[in-house]
Amino acid sequence: MINRNTVKVLNLKPVTRTMCHDFYVKINSEFDTPEAIKEAVSWWQDDYKKLNDLWWVLNYYSDNLDPDRNIRAFVERHLDSLAQKKKPLVDS
């Protein structure tokens, strides 16, 4: 799960399965391996909203995309890192 503090600092919103279906189709058609999905994280490295959407896609469609939960954990760590960078700005 995404850390509560990360959710708060980045103001992340929950995404329904219906809301992320189109993104799932895009990911499923463009990225054919877990490594390719992880590489996409580097493309979206500062876009925490896109990373949040990716996390929800991986959560809802875990059987197809992330059965071992490794990619979700990778995205969670990246979101935590973004929150840590932003937190000093929030605390100021």
Image: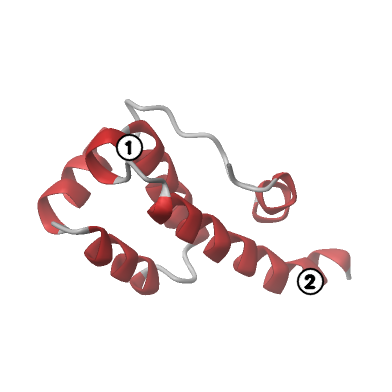
Q: In x, y percent, where is residue 90?
A: 80, 64
The vertical placement of 50 against 4, above or below, is: below
Q: In x, y percent, where is residue 59?
A: 40, 37
Residue at left offset 49%, top offset 70%: 46
Residue under label 1: 62
Query: Image quarter for residue 31?
Result: bottom left
Residue at disc 2, secondary structure: helix
Looking at the image, residue 54 sits to the left or right of residue 27; the answer is: right
Residue at left offset 71%, top offset 68%: 84
| Quadrant assignment for the C terminus | bottom right
Looking at the image, residue 77 sits to the left or right of residue 31; the answer is: right
What separation in Å lies between label 2 and label 1 (alpha carbons)? Answer: 34 Å
Residue at left offset 49%, top offset 54%: 73
The vertical placement of 91 against 49, above or below, is: below
Residues at badges 2 and 1 in contact (C-beta under 8 Å)?
no
Q: Residue furthest front?
A: 68
Mark 1 residue type: Ser
Q: In x, y percent, where is residue 89?
A: 78, 71
Q: In x, y percent, where is residue 76?
A: 54, 55
Mark linked to residue 1: none
Residue under label 2: 89
Query: Image quarter for residue 22?
Result: top left
